[in-house]
Amino acid sequence: MKLIDSLSLCLLLSALSLPTVLSANAGADATLVNTLAKSHITSPKIVGSGRMTYLLWDIYDAILLTDSGSYLAEQPFALKLDYLREFEGKEIAKRSVKEMQRQGELDAKTSARWRTLMENIFPDVKKGDFILGVADKQKYSHFYSQSGWLGSIEEPQFTQRFFNIWLGEDTSEPEFRLQLLGETP
């Protein structure tokens, strides 16, 4: 789904008094609305969105959602990645750990444990699939796909490092971060 089509869908959902989230169909919208409501994001509003591109390849479209429509790391938020290519779940976990290590010292034992946890949670994805990550008010991470709940990691340090891949000041993609935060790069 193109980003502009997704935004049109959001406007339609908003007009129907439903929380605004991006997805490819109404069934997925209902699932996401319920998921977000259970995760302490009862009235999701878009903070920002963007497309991750690596070299010449489009990787995923992303959208950041909060109750207020603005991002504060201390408050619950959701980050949805709509994949535009196929990836193995193990590769997603491996890349995530590398990005988490870029943020500062992370011991080998913790890195290995987090990688194993993510490998057990993240499915293989194909074009059109999504993974929704939610940080709740306890700073626990919960992951969902179009199939439903994938798993949770109840470690605030993991949650901070994981979502800082996209939202942290030291991200490897600062322009993409600004798009997610609704700021002009």
Image (cartoon, helix red, strand yellow):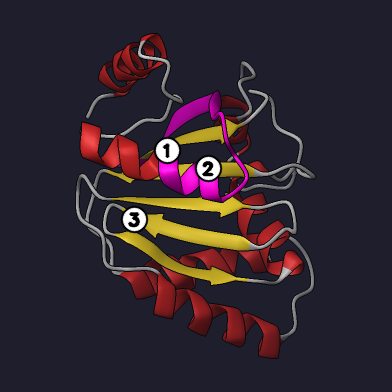
Q: Which residue appears at 60% of the width and 61% of the height? A: 141
In the drawing, what numbered circle is on residue 33?
1
Residue 127 percent coordinates (x, y):
19, 48
Q: Earlier in the sequence, mark 3 or mark 2?
A: 2
The quadrant holding residue 112 is: bottom right
Q: Is residue 88 above or below residue 169?
A: below
Q: Which residue appears at 51% of the width and 53% of the height? A: 133
Q: Residue furthest bottom?
A: 109
Q: Is residue 24 left or right of residue 60?
A: left
Q: Are marks 1 and 2 in contact (CB under 8 Å)?
A: yes
Q: Which residue is mark 2?
A: 37
Q: Which residue is mark 3?
A: 145
Give, as a single range, the part of the protein colored magenta.
Answer: 33-60
Q: Quadrant of the C terminus?
A: top right
Q: Is residue 36 magenta?
A: yes
| Amino acid type at image mark 2 | Ala
Residue 166 can be seen in this image: yes
